[in-house]
Image (cartoon, helix red, strand yellow):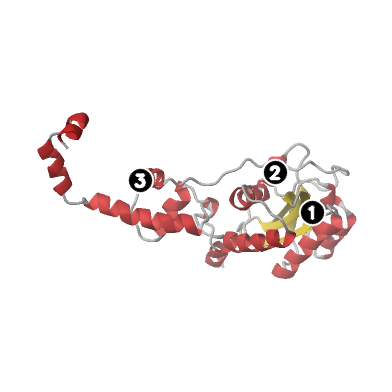
């Protein structure tokens, strides 16, 4: 012990006094916070970073600073999962000026005013499957999703029909997407016209004009797809169902005041 104390530059009495010193209130609170944070991280499947963990702790009644949360995350060895998302190859952009961007500088005040849609792809057993999704821009709630092997207007109309059945929006809905051919086809457009909805599309070379659905796909790939291998389509469907339930009912969204989409809709109702 004398050799160790000499090595670290402390005295023997000082070392024993430190050992006998009672645990500070700050240290005890750190331990409580670490237990709470561990539960939050596990519930989010390791996807939450410090801002969402901070908001979850505040919601549980803890008085804590952002810096303390960041420090304790380092102590716990936690880091949010992130991934760079590569955009899919654009489809054949025909009829460029057929549908203008109707949502630029437009703010929603309630659900079912603007829906946004897009598709991406996921590898299953070495084969690409397309994933189409429809999102309510106001609440960020995922309304419908669909998997398929072909990317055409019938495929996207299928996911649109599922969203329409679920929400039953009145006339005046705007559906916004990029200029992929699967959203320009007659079957898709005819369904919108029949429901009294207007079609809106991004301008050429402006992928950021569909940022809400892009953000969802980024979260999906970072939190579910990245680092996992799906050997069957049924396994992917099962995980997608679980994730969508979590995303809509539990996941905290910074743009919604750190509430879930469902909680945000309930508060606005």
What residue do we see at 41% from left, 59% from top?
Answer: 59
Q: Residues within 10 Å of mark 2 (few under 14, many from 20)?
A: some
Q: Residues within 10 Å of mark 1 (few under 14, many from 20)?
A: many
Q: Work out whether residue 251 or residue 202 is closer to the camera in this orientation and state it.
A: 251
Disc 1 on helix, strand or loop? Answer: strand
Q: Which residue is mark 3?
A: 68
Q: Position of residue 172 (x, y in %)?
A: 74, 61
Q: Position of residue 233 (x, y in %)?
A: 74, 59
Residue 8 position (above or below residue 254): above
Disc 3 on helix, strand or loop? Answer: helix
Side of 242 relative to 92 (left or right): left
Tell us which disc is closer to us: 2 or 3: 3
Residue 203 lies in quadrant: top right
Looking at the image, is mark 2 or mark 3 earlier in the sequence? 3
Residue 205 position (above or below residue 185): above
What residue do we see at 71% from left, 57% from top?
Answer: 134
Q: Which residue is mark 2?
A: 209
What distance separates the C-alpha of mark 1 from that of mark 3?
Answer: 47 Å
What distance separates the C-alpha of mark 2 from that of mark 3?
Answer: 36 Å
Quarter occupied by the N terminus: top left
Labels 2 & 3 near each other (Cβ < 8 A): no
Q: Position of residue 71 (x, y in %)?
A: 37, 43
Labels 1 & 3 near each other (Cβ < 8 A): no
Looking at the image, is mark 1 or mark 2 earlier in the sequence? 1
Quarter occupied by the C terminus: bottom right
Q: Which residue is mark 1?
A: 199
Q: Work out whether residue 240 or residue 155 is closer to the camera in this orientation and state it.
A: 240
Side of 79 relative to 142 (left or right): left
Q: Residues within 10 Å of mark 3 (few under 14, many from 20)?
A: some
Q: Position of residue 164 (x, y in %)?
A: 75, 66
Q: Quick check: can you spot residue 189?
A: no
């Amino acid at each position: 012990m004398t050799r160790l104390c000499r090595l670290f530059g402390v005295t023997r009495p000082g070392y024993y006094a430190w050992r006998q010193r009672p645990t500070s209130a700050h240290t005890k609170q750190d331990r409580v916070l670490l237990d709470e944070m561990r539960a939050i991280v596990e519930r989010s499947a390791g996807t939450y970073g410090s801002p969402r963990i901070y908001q979850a702790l505040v919601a549980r009644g803890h008085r804590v600073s952002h810096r303390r949360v960041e420090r304790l995350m380092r102590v716990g060895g936690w880091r949010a999962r992130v991934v760079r998302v590569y955009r899919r190859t654009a489809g054949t952009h025909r009829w460029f000026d057929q549908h203008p961007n109707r949502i630029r500088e437009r703010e929603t005040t309630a659900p079912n005013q603007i829906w946004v849609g897009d598709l991406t792809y996921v590898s299953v057993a070495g084969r690409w499957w397309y994933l189409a999704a429809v999102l309510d821009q106001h609440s960020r709630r995922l309304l419908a999703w669909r998997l398929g092997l072909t990317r055409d207007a019938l495929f996207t109309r299928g996911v649109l029909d599922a969203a329409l059945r679920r929400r039953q929006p009145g006339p005046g809905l705007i559906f916004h997407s990029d200029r992929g051919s699967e959203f320009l086809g007659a079957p898709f457009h005819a369904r919108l016209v029949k429901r009294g909805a207007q079609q809106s599309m991004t301008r050429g070379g402006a992928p950021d004009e569909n940022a809400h659905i892009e953000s969802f796909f980024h979260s999906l790939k970072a939190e579910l797809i990245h680092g996992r291998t799906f050997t069957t389509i049924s396994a992917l469907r099962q995980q997608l169902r679980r994730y969508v339930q979590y995303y809509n009912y539990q996941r905290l969204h910074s743009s919604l005041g750190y509430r879930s989409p469902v909680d945000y809709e309930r508060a606005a109702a």
